[in-house]
Image (cartoon, helix red, strand yellow):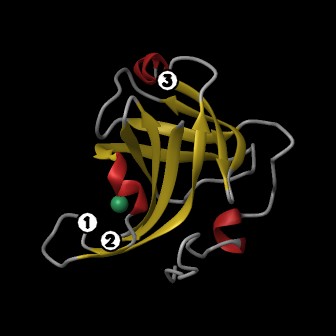
Amino acid sequence: MNQFVVQKHRATTLHYDFRIQIEGILKSWAVPRGPSLDPTQKRLAVETEDHPLSYAHFEGQIPEGSYGAGEVIVWDRGECLYPSDPLHQYRQGKIKFILKGEKLKGEFLLLRTGPQSGPKSKWLLMKRDDSHISYEEITRSKPSSVISLRKLED
Ligand code: MN
């Protein structure tokens, strides 16, 4: 089973760290506006460094002086399914996946906007049209951590 996690992170700027498991690691993107269930939204997602699977459970404070210093909550998590080989899709710059989270459900797409994958490459995160779409802004309607019920103020 592959997993995903979305960590809401207040560092220098507030953003959502969107991480999906591919081949035993968490491929990661920083999404300033967060994910959406609205299929008309295209959310900028800047690829960041891979993280170990163990990081999927992290919630708390990254200490002052460390990279990304600030507070983190686990905003959503669950299973991630791929219709075809995810590493191949990642290299091609077009990743189709299905999320089975507590908040994010259904088909999504990450689409690279430039020539190469890797840290700092720019992607768009989009909800694909299916029975799980919603036009309500889920980051606002469901702001709390799925493990502690804590919130980060916007
Ligand atoms: Mn972050």
Most distant residue in the front direction: 1
* Three-letter residue code for mark 1: Gly
Residue 133 place in picture, x, y as percent:
81, 48
Residue 102 place in picture, x, y as percent:
68, 59
Which mark is on residue 68? 1
How many numbered marks have been drawn onto this rendered protein structure?
3
Give the Cα separation between the discs numbered 2 and 1: 5 Å
N-term-proximal mark, 1 vs 3: 1
Q: Are marks 3 and 2 in contact (CB under 8 Å)?
A: no
Q: Which residue in the structure is indicated by mark 2?
A: 11
Residue at horizontal 54 percent and vertical 36 percent from the top: 1
Q: Residues within 10 Å of mark 1 (few under 14, many from 20)?
A: some
Give the Cα separation between the discs numbered 3 and 2: 29 Å
Q: Where 84 falls versus 65 (above or below)?
A: above
User: Tag 3's secondary structure?
Assistant: helix
Mark 2 beta carbon near ligand 1 (under 8 Å)? yes
Q: Is residue 94 left or right of residue 21?
A: right
Residue at horizontal 73 percent and vertical 36 percent from the top: 128
Q: Which residue in the structure is indicated by mark 3?
A: 86
Q: Residues within 10 Å of mark 3 (few under 14, many from 20)?
A: some
User: Tag 1's secondary structure?
Assistant: loop
